[in-house]
Image: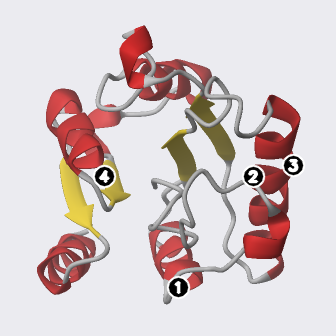
Amino acid sequence: FDRDNTLVHDDGYNADLKNYLVMQDSYLYVRLFQSLGYQVFMVSNQSSINRKINNLSEVRKFNTFLMSDFRSKGAYITDSVFCPHTPSEKCNCRKPKTLLIDNLTKKYNLLIENSFFIGDSDSDKNLAKNLGISFSNIQSINGNKKMLKNLKIL
């Protein structure tokens, strides 16, 4: 799962807990994937760090709070990874490049071909394409229908 505008509302470079707002049905979607035996991961671009809008500690604190909040609702997120770089830095970890997912795949011995990516942006969609996995845009009705259809097949 992407983080911003997928699991939580994005106010623009958000790492301030006073702006923490969970997106509608996010807990449900995480629990649905878990009920089918999937591990859930949060993967996001957080360029606010290298833009000096937020620092690494603030982003980690926000992500830790998010994971704890979801856990309290029975929606477990196994791990959270993010890219702190700006687009101009041309790193290999910024979505839609695959390094963050590649690292999770190795760390957790995941079968990438059985994975999904849920997000809201072109970078999320292109990440899934680069990985050769299904993508659902959680912010579109058709994306939600596609995700639920994929879950039914499983």
Q: Amino acid at mark 2?
A: Asn
Q: Which residue is mark 3?
A: 61
- How many angstroms separate mark 2 from mark 4 (CA)? 21 Å
Q: Which residue is mark 4?
A: 116
Farthest front residue? Answer: 52
In the image, 68 versus 86, the foreground residue is: 86
Q: Amino acid at mark 1?
A: Leu
Query: Mark 3 and mark 4 in contact (Cβ < 8 Å)?
Result: no
Q: Residue at x 68, y 43 (%)?
A: 79
Q: Residue at x 59, y 34 (%)?
A: 82
Q: Amino acid at mark 3?
A: Lys
Along the polypeptide, which appears first: circle 1 or circle 4? 1
- How many angstroms separate mark 1 from mark 3 (CA)? 23 Å
Marking on residue 28: 1
Q: Element under label 1?
A: helix
- Residue 90: % across, % down: 37, 10
Q: Quadrant of the C terminus?
A: bottom left
Residue 102 makes an appearance in the image: yes
Q: Residue at x 54, y 28 (%)?
A: 104
Which one is in front in this view, the residue at disc 2 or the one at disc 4? 2
Q: Which residue is mark 2?
A: 63
Q: Residue at x 73, y 73 (%)?
A: 20
- Residue 13: % across, % down: 60, 50
Q: Element under label 2?
A: helix
Question: Badge 3: few (under 14), some or many (20 or more) residues near its Cα, within 10 Å?
Answer: some
Query: Mark 3 and mark 2 in contact (Cβ < 8 Å)?
Result: yes
Which one is in front in this view, the residue at disc 1 or the one at disc 3? 3
Q: Is residue 129 above or below residue 134?
A: above
- Residue 48: % across, % down: 62, 37
48 lies left or right of 115: right
